[in-house]
Image: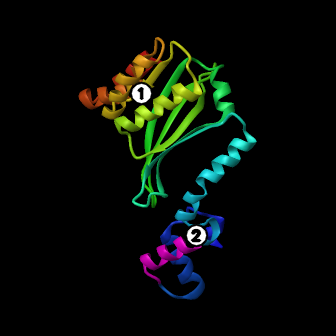
Amino acid sequence: MRVTADLGIPIKALMKEVVSRFGYTVTYRKAWKAKQIAMSRIYGDWEGSCKELSRWFNVVQWYLPGTVVRYGASNHDNIDTYILDRVFWSFKPCIDGFGFCKPILQVDGTFLTRKYNGTLLIASSQDGNRRIFPIVFAIAEGETKEAWKWFFFNIRSFVTQQANICIISDSGTGLLSALRTELSQWCNAHSVFCIRHVASNFNKEFCDTKLKEKVIQMGM
């Protein structure tokens, strides 16, 4: 019941719950395994969830026609089996809404945890009130040059070919390498660094938080 009510309940809290209710002390590992079993019974296991991914996207495309989903897969030893390497998607309302946003794409990635690792890649824009507007998402093997090239190719091919787009990013090696290739494929596209990343690097060099804030203000 505790796991059902709170998926993020800490393992130590479960250990205390067992002591309180049953007067028995369990090891951290045993409590952790029990939580994994409970989560699997409630939400399904990792393997089953991954197998349902394509079906879930098919349902999304059925109810939101115009939603874009692209897969990247590689052959397994078994000739009839493929391994999912990447998936890219953009919901139809996001695609339509981008036409009313500023001509900018803010791109970034964040690593995923749990059983299957990888990286979530995101591109967002800003509306007229400077609020974040998500455009596209992807799950890939990491922030590699090839993953970013695939990401930008899908944006350009299936989401928008708008000219004069400004792409805002950090200075990641794989991302910059991909941008050098992709920018030539966009009409008058430009690339700039995220001001917060610039300010953070500035602060590492000069160790002055007040100057860091001024750098951010200069770029806003």
Using the rendered view, name the quadrant where residue 60 is placed: top right
SS majority, magenta = helix
Q: Residue at x 72, y 36 (%)?
A: 65
- Residues in magenta, as a range: 26-38
Quadrant into which the N terminus falls: bottom right
Residue at the location (44% across, 19% down)?
A: 185
Depth check, front residue: 53 or 73 = 73
Q: Position of residue 73 (x, y in %)?
A: 46, 48
Q: Give the residue pinned by disc 2.
A: 40
How many labels, in total?
Answer: 2
Looking at the image, can residue 78 be seen? yes
Viewer-nearest residue: 177 or 216: 177
- Label 1, secondary structure: give it: strand
Instruction: Judge from the rendering whether residue 199 lies leftward or rightward of residue 121; answer left or right.
Output: left
Residue toward you, 119 or 61: 61
Q: Position of residue 25 (x, y in %)?
A: 47, 85
Q: Is residue 35 magenta?
A: yes
Query: Which percent across, then down, holds residue 34?
Result: 52, 77
Extreme residue in the left direction: 205
Identify which amino acid the numbered label 1 is placed on.
Ser
